[in-house]
Image (tube, rainbow, N blue to C red):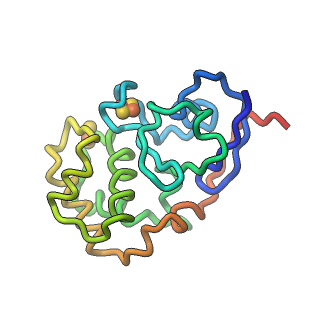
Amino acid sequence: MQVEINVNGKARKAEVEDRTLLVYFLRDTLQLTGTHVGCDTSSCGACTVHLDGVAVKSCTLLAAQADGCSVTTIEGMAKDGEMHPLQEGFRECHGLQCGYCTPGMIMTAADLLKRTPKPSETEIRFALEGNICRCTGYHNIVKAIQWAAENTAAPMLADSHLWTNDVVVEKVVETE
Ligand code: FES
Ligand code: FES
């Protein structure tokens, strides 16, 4: 079947199998491999992206379910060559070790900061309950999100910021 999905501000049209998960559409068809697969069973959160502005686990959705929707991945977070404040926060606060969970953590945190620009530590930890990190013990991840909340004007984290990027994709299966 054919799907058309706006990914990081660009319309993408492709042929996919009915059973294709959104995460594999992003990784295999669009080659946006920043979205990771950790469990494939909706437990770890490594595959988190935004679907119409809401954080979702892309291993739990079919690409067909995203047809006609907008998706933002970690590749769409930086703007004009500058890292997103959350990416800066993870760097500043050493919020990662192996980095496997990091894209999902950042996408979940971006959703939180859109809804709650100045979250408490409890609110941050609650928001991250669906994202697993096997390395850090979470403390520096929480600090990274607090850093982003403190060092950024809230409008910077709105969807319009996230979706204005023009990600260059070399290999797209176009049908027309
Ligand atoms: S790969 Fe999707 S939640 Fe783990
Ligand atoms: S930094 Fe390794 S899983 Fe989180």
Give the number of marks. Answer: 0
Q: Tell me where residue 168 appears, x and y as whole percent.
A: 65, 50
Residue ranking furthest to the bottom: 153
Residue occupying the point 26% across, 63% down = 92
Residue placed most toward the observer, 82 or 64 = 64
Residue occupying the point 31% across, 66% down = 116
Residue occupying the point 36% across, 64% down = 115
Which image quadrant: the N terminus? Answer: top right
Residue occupying the point 40% across, 25% down = 40
In-image side of 34 versus 167 (left or right) = left
Q: Quadrant of residue 87?
A: bottom left
In-image side of 166 versus 132 (left or right) = right
Q: Quadrant of residue 121?
A: bottom left
Residue ranking furthest to the right: 176
Q: Tell me where residue 28 appears, x and y as whole percent.
A: 58, 30
Q: Relative to 110, is 171 above or below?
A: above
Q: Tell me where residue 113 appears, x and y as whole percent.
A: 34, 64
In-image side of 36 versus 28 (left or right) = left
Which image quadrant: the C terminus? Answer: top right
Q: Tell me where residue 155 appears, x and y as whole percent.
A: 44, 75
Q: Relative to 112, is 169 above or below?
A: above
Residue placed most toward the observer, 44 or 27 = 44
Q: Which quadrant contains ligand 1?
A: top left
